[in-house]
């Protein structure tokens, strides 16, 4: 197929302040990334990355972000991400940083990775948890996700086969 | 660990779980619109996957199953209990064909046509529109040099039976001597010729036209005996049938339906079909496919012959209690094939052989053809048959059907044409040896076929029925052929051979105008029903090319005759046709994107898809009235103004209704006299003219809401056609004009015509002076003075250009679009008020289409820089003439106005402008009589 090939960067926003995550917004995020690229790589880098750059997915609760850019210049974006140190929104400044989890060629692979990653995170949380009530709540969500997985297992496998 | 962190941990876990489920959903959904098996990698694909779900990996089978159930991928549903082989089996196929014929009537040649033609459903029939092969030019060549064959069996036939006087009296109100010969014309009444005329509603001439028909009278056995019951066949186009049938029924006072033999035969047929239809499925279910013996099965299924859509309960014949006239509808009871072109003689004489006379010496065992044996016992009829045969043989020596008197009828009884079918398709060529018999040929050409020879048994319903029923099937015939001792030798059936009564009718080709007279003439062959294919194939094996509806349109266009029903705007069928055509064209226009279609508003075309005749004639009438008053005073030409003044006292003519009605009565009773009156009308104007004038005036007075009508009075048309040409240059016409006693083109004459036909249209033919080919709905306009000047300076001047018009609707449409968009946006926000918002844009959409004039049309004549005169209804490049030719109607008022204002040398020049162009082109107008 003839198409523009993209790279998708699956990142996680890490911040101490939970309000930082909630104030996340695709316009704010894209301007933030653009500014950072311009700062780090100059005008050429900004121009090269601005083609096809987009925020494809954003989850304010978990802080997961999916960025899209052209395959040719994804390294410029990638290398610029560590230089983001704070998020500015509505006059507030939240110190934070981006943790790149995965770089994929399609949204679908990123989604699959995210499923795996989240599952792993939940299990780690379950292991480290000491409180009883807390433990129960986490157990519940883990089983829910697992049940869902059971249901969709055939479908998922199909999707894997599709890829 | 603090409490806040604990709480975040649980929410954190919940958020993760929610994300997992969302991601799972997204991943499992199929995003592309390809099929499931198409998403598999190539090495995992298998050939049968597309139709067999089990070929897929098991995990994909469920999705694939869902996909296969969608309607798009469903295969066409065949009848479930029959396999392909069973469907192809003869019995089932006949059943299926019979079922499919229930809605639309199939001609007998339907299957043949369906394999080779683009079929259309029209007028309740399935008809071949045009051949699938590229054959426009080939068909034209066949018409001019060879032979074109058409199946016109869809034409309807009405039969009138009764006393001659009664029929003539009843029908006299429906036609007028003005338009030509009536039912009472001498040649037609004797049964010698076919006549053609235009029917009107009773006593409504010249308005309320019903349509053109052709008619033939059955010849009298004993000439001069008026008490004998006569038969009259009226042939007409299926679109006109309903109106004309009703009108004739009313005119003859035929109200009581008659159960005729035709009606009884049908229910039996359908009953047996239904029975067998109900029986068959039972037999099939659950059993092996082996069919039972035919002996057990009560009756073999009959093919539908004739009209399959007929309701057996409805009457098809009506009788009048007072006059005894019986009207019956013989639609589809006969086949009518038309052969056009000079080779039709040789094809006819080669394909058809006259029946052999049954001699007494032969074995008189039971044959189904009793009627022929009976006939052969009578020496008179045998000699008649021989004479018919001799005349038919003579036809082979005549080079073109045009040489024979127009409308000649020849009856004949012929043998089965399938028997001497050639092995291969060949081309029949005229046989020069047959031309030897010059004396007889000359006599035939001069006198036509004698009256006695027009007799045919096809007029007799019983014989036709027996002929249809006793036809040897193709299968039997082929079996007999295969059993011949010497393969390929002539099959001799002897007395078992079918004898088919047929009727040959000569069709005059181009009878109007001066050039190419007799072009497109040919023969019509009438056959009893059931015999269509038996004659069709032999004709084709002799080299006839078959044409469809398009070819018949081309034929009538090159003949410059109006095409039924499109070129009869004043009859109900014509109006219906125009409406339908406009609807289709509009639909087609709307299918294109707005940027890719002509903006007719900017082009100044008010009605690109239909011709607003009513408005055109109204406009011209009001123009003429408005023109009259000021022009009398300020006329540049002294003479003309004098004439105009003089016409004023002339206009109110003395009325003598009594005398006129007397005249009509005598004319119809004595057809010879009627013709004389007609001739007199052509030679010297004053006497009969006043009569017709009065009649017309009375009619005009009677019909207060004076409707549209088409001028068909031959006398007036002749006069107009003489005026149309450039009078001073054409010496021949100039010489002839005074001899005929033609009136000059004067103001007085014009006004007298206009008084009678204030809103009339005239059928004109136009030939382009320069390049280009006109299309339908092209506008015919009056050239201005400067156009003539420029044409005079430069003979190659191709015509003026219309300036671009502004489009007042464009802004409105844009506004509407904006509004719609805004509404949509509003609707997307709060989804509260669904009802009213939904309805509004639909109503708005109907009102305006970009590029079309909406709302009532303004004055059509004055909309463009050149005054509109009329519209073209048929137009194309004419291969017969070699330039673009068009046929159409112009307003009579406008035509006279234009002719009287043009200089004599350039009289009859008009401008043509296609609806999608700004360029005018010069054309010469001609009226052909």
Image (tube, coloured by chain):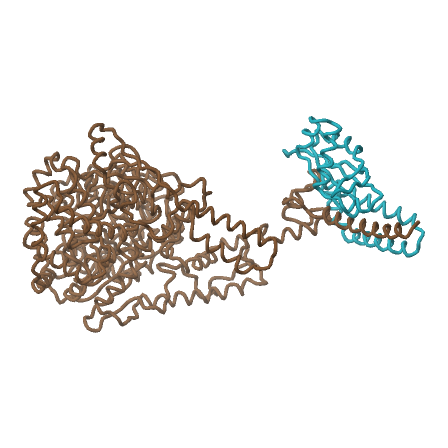
Closest to the observer: B447 or B167?
Answer: B167
Q: How many marks?
A: 0
x and y percentages locating residue B903 in the rendered image? 15, 37
Q: Where B470 sits versus B399, above or below?
A: below
x and y percentages locating residue B822 in the rendered image? 54, 50
Which residue is found at the position 8% from the left and 47% from the top? B643
x and y percentages locating residue B221 in the rendered image? 15, 61
**Residue B676, visible in the rendered structure:** no
Which residue is found at the position 63% from the left and 33% from the top? A2
Closest to the observer: B218 or B760?
Answer: B760
Q: Is residue B183 left or right of residue B643?
A: right
The tint of chain A in the picture is: cyan
Closest to the observer: B533 or B717?
Answer: B717
Q: Which residue reaches farthest bottom? A: B321
Q: Where B285 sits versus B646, above or below?
A: below
Closest to the observer: B327 or B336?
Answer: B327
Q: Is residue B31 left or right of residue B760?
A: right
**Residue B750, visible in the rendered structure:** yes
x and y percentages locating residue B98 in the rendered image? 43, 59
Q: Chain in brown? A: B
Question: Where is residue B244, by image quadrant?
Answer: bottom left
Question: Where is residue A32, by image quadrant?
Answer: top right
Q: Which residue reaches farthest front? A: A91
């Amino acid at each position: 197929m003839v198409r523009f090939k993209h790279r998708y960067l699956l990142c996680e926003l890490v911040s101490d302040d939970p309000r930082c995550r909630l104030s996340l917004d695709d316009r704010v995020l894209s301007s933030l990334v653009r500014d950072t690229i311009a700062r780090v790589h100059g005008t050429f880098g900004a121009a090269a990355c601005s083609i096809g750059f987009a925020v494809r997915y954003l989850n304010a609760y978990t802080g997961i972000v999916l960025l899209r850019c052209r395959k040719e210049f994804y390294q410029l974006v990638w290398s610029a991400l560590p230089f983001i140190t704070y998020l500015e929104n509505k006059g507030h400044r939240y110190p934070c940083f981006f943790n790149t989890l995965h770089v994929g060629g399609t949204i679908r692979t990123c989604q699959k990775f995210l499923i795996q990653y989240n599952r792993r995170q939940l299990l780690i949380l379950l292991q480290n948890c000491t409180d009883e009530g807390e433990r129960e709540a986490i157990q519940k969500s883990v089983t829910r996700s697992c049940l869902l997985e059971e249901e969709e297992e055939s479908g998922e496998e199909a999707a894997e086969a599709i890829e | 660990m603090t409490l806040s962190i604990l709480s975040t941990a649980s929410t954190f876990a919940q958020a993760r779980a929610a994300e997992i489920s969302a991601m799972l959903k997204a991943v499992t959904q199929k995003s592309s619109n390809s099929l499931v098996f198409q998403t598999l990698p190539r090495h995992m694909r298998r050939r049968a996957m597309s139709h067999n779900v089990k070929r897929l990996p098991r995990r994909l089978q469920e999705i694939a199953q869902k996909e296969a159930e969608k309607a798009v991928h469903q295969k066409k549903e065949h009848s479930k209990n029959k396999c392909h082989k069973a469907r192809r089996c003869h019995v089932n196929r006949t059943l299926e064909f019979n079922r499919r014929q229930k809605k639309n009537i199939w001609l007998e040649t339907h299957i043949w046509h369906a394999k080779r033609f683009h079929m259309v459903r029209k007028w309740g029939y399935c008809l071949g529109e045009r051949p699938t092969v590229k054959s426009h030019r080939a068909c034209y060549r066949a018409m001019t040099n060879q032979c074109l064959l058409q199946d016109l069996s869809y034409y309807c036939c009405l039969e009138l039976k009764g006393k001659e006087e009664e029929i003539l009296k009843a029908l006299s109100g429906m036609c007028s001597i003005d338009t030509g010969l009536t039912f009472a014309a001498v040649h037609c009444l004797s049964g010698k010729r076919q006549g053609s005329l235009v029917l009107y509603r009773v006593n409504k001439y010249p308005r309320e036209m019903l349509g053109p028909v052709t008619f033939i009278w059955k010849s009298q056995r004993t000439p001069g005996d008026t008490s004998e019951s006569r038969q009259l066949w009226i042939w007409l186009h299926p679109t006109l049938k309903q109106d004309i049938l009703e009108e004739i029924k009313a005119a003859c006072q035929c109200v009581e339906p008659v159960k005729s033999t035709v009606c009884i035969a049908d229910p039996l047929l359908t009953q047996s079909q239904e029975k067998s239809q109900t029986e068959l499925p039972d037999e099939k279910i659950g059993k092996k496919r082996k069919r039972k013996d035919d002996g057990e099965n009560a009756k073999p299924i009959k093919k539908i012959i004739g009209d399959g859509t007929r309701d057996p309960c409805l009457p098809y014949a009506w009788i009048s209690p007072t006059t005894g006239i019986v009207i019956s509808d013989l639609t589809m009871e006969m086949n009518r094939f038309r052969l056009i072109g000079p080779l039709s003689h040789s094809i006819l004489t080669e394909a058809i052989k006259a029946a052999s006379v049954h001699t007494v010496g032969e074995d008189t065992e039971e044959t189904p053809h009793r009627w022929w044996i009976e006939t052969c016992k009578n020496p008179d009829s045998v000699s008649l048959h021989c004479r018919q045969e001799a005349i038919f043989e003579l036809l082979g020596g005549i080079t073109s059907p045009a040489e024979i008197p127009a409308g000649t009828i020849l009856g004949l009884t012929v043998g089965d044409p399938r028997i001497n079918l050639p092995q291969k398709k060949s081309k029949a060529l005229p046989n020069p040896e047959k031309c030897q018999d010059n004396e007889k040929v000359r006599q035939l050409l001069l006198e036509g076929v004698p009256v006695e020879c027009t007799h045919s048994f096809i007029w007799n319903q019983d014989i036709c029925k027996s002929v249809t029923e006793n036809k040897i099937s193709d299968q039997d015939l082929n079996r007999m052929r295969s059993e011949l001792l010497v393969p390929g030798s002539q099959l001799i059936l002897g007395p078992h051979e079918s004898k088919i009564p047929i009727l040959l009718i000569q069709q005059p080709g181009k009878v109007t105008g001066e050039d190419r007279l007799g072009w497109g003439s040919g023969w019509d062959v009438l056959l009893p029903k059931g015999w269509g294919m038996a004659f069709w194939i032999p004709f084709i094996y002799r080299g006839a090319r078959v044409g469809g509806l398009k070819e018949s349109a081309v034929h009538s266009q090159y003949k410059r005759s109006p095409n039924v029903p499109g070129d009869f705007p004043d009859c109900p069928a014509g109006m219906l046709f125009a409406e339908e055509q406009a609807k289709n064209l509009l639909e087609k226009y709307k299918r294109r994107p707005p940027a890719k279609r002509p903006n007719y508003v900017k082009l100044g075309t008010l009605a690109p898809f239909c011709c607003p005749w009513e408005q055109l004639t109204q406009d011209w009438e009001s123009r003429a009235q408005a023109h009259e008053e000021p022009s009398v005073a300020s006329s540049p030409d002294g003479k003309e103004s004098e004439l105009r003044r003089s016409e004023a006292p002339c206009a109110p003519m003395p009325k003598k209704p009594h005398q006129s009605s007397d005249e009509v009565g005598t004319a119809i009773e004595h057809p010879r006299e009627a013709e004389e009156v007609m001739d007199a009308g052509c030679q010297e104007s004053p006497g009969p003219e006043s009569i017709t004038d009065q009649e017309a005036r009375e009619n005009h007075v009677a019909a207060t809401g004076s409707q549209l009508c088409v001028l068909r009075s031959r006398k007036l048309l002749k006069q107009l056609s003489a005026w149309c040409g450039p009078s001073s240059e054409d010496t021949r016409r100039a010489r002839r004009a005074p001899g005929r006693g033609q009136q000059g083109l004067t103001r007085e004459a014009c006004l007298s015509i206009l008084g009678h036909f204030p809103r009339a249209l005239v059928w004109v033919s136009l030939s382009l002076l320069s390049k280009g080919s006109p299309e339908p709905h092209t506008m015919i306009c009056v050239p201005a003075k400067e156009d003539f000047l420029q044409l005079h300076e430069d003979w190659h001047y191709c015509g003026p250009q219309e300036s671009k018009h502004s489009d007042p609707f464009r802004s409105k449409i844009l506004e509407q679009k904006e509004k719609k968009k805004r509404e949509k946006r509003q609707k997307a926000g709060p989804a509260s008020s669904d009802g009213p918002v939904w309805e509004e844009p639909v109503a708005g959409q109907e009102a305006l289409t970009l590029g079309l004039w909406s709302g009532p049309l303004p004055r059509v004549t004055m909309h463009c820089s050149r005054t509109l005169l009329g519209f073209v209804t048929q137009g194309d490049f004419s291969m017969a003439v070699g330039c673009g030719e068009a046929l159409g109607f112009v307003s009579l008022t406008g035509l006279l106005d234009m002719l009287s204002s043009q200089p004599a040398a350039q009289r009859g020049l008009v401008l043509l402008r296609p609806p999608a162009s700004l360029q005018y082109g010069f054309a010469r107008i001609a009226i052909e009589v």
